Amino acid sequence: MKVEFLKSVYQLKDLPPITENRKEVVFVGRSNVGKSSLLNLLTGRNIAKVGKTPGRTRAINYFKWDYNELKSFLVDLPGYGFAKGDKREIENWKRLIEGYFNRRRENIGLVLVLIDAKVGPTGDDKKMIQWLDYLGIPYIVVLTKIDKAKQKEISSTLKKLKELGVETLVQTSSKEKKGKEQLLKVIWNYLKEEPNKTNS
Ligand SMILES: Nc1nc2c(ncn2[C@@H]2O[C@H](COP(=O)(O)OP(=O)(O)O)[C@@H](O)[C@H]2O)c(=O)[nH]1
Ligand SMILES: [Mg+2]
């Protein structure tokens, strides 16, 4: 396995060219939900910055990832749900994220929608899931921080997600290094699929 930081993208024009046949594995979710930690868990490297002030990481961070013969980009998106951000900042965030998904749609292999096991899906998470459904972009939900949640809270989160129609789900704890192998397997299965196969 090989991973390297490629670049931070603040403007859509700086997105890397779609070359080398690299599909994108995208991390989305609330600020602080554990996106960067999960990226580090998956790659076994301390490569994404963890625990920066929520909402302050406004860039799309690209990593090149070679996992066995599978080549991809890992894409760490800036988090949503920062109540204190000013209006203009939120507008900029929205433009960047919407532009990202519209432009990269065809190149996205899988979106990981991260949801805190204890908190459950928020309004923003629901909007994101519905939007991905609408765009026809493949995604799965990844529960994070299961080490912090009681079994009862996890059950309640699972129930809410089921009501939203979410089927594929992996439970993880970056702290306790749980769920890594299962998640790698799911990602592998999505990325190895032939292009257009999922749309037939
Ligand atoms: N207990 C626990 N804390 C975690 C876990 N994953 C991340 N965190 C903590 O949650 C905070 C935010 O993590 P980060 O990966 O930066 O979240 P991001 O903003 O979504 O990228 C940090 O303080 C992490 O140490 C986890 O699995 N368990
Ligand atoms: Mg982060």
Image (cartoon, rainbow, N blue to C red):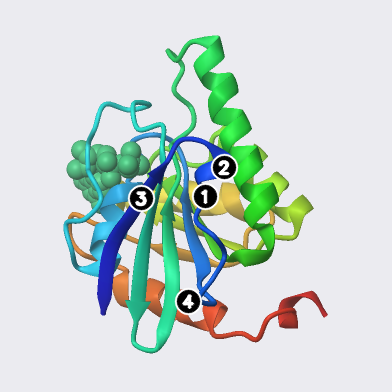
**Residue receiving disc 2:** 13
Separation (CA) of disc 1 from disc 3: 9 Å
Disc 2 + disc 1, Cβ < 8 Å: yes
Residue 97 placement, left or right of 200: left
> Residue placed at 50% from the left, 76% from the top?
20
| N-term-proximal mark, 1 vs 3 | 3
**Residue 63 marker:** none
> Residue placed at 79% from the left, 75% from the top?
199
**Residue 15 marker:** 1
Q: Position of residue 163 (x, y in %)?
A: 67, 51
| N-term-proximal mark, 4 vs 2 | 2
Image quadrant of residue 133?
Answer: bottom right
Separation (CA) of disc 2 from disc 1: 6 Å
Disc 3 + disc 4, Cβ < 8 Å: no
Q: Position of residue 93 (x, y in %)?
A: 53, 28
**Residue receiving disc 3:** 7
Image quadrant of residue 185?
Answer: bottom left
Q: Position of residue 55 (x, y in %)?
A: 38, 26
Instruction: Label 3: state its secondary structure.
Output: strand
Residue 10 placement, left or right of 101: left
Query: Three-letter amino acid code at disc 1?
Result: Leu
**Residue 173 seen in render:** no
**Residue receiving disc 4:** 186
Instruction: Label 1: state its secondary structure.
Output: loop
Disc 4 + disc 1, Cβ < 8 Å: no
Separation (CA) of disc 4 from disc 2: 31 Å
Mark 2 near ligand 2 (CB under 8 Å)? no
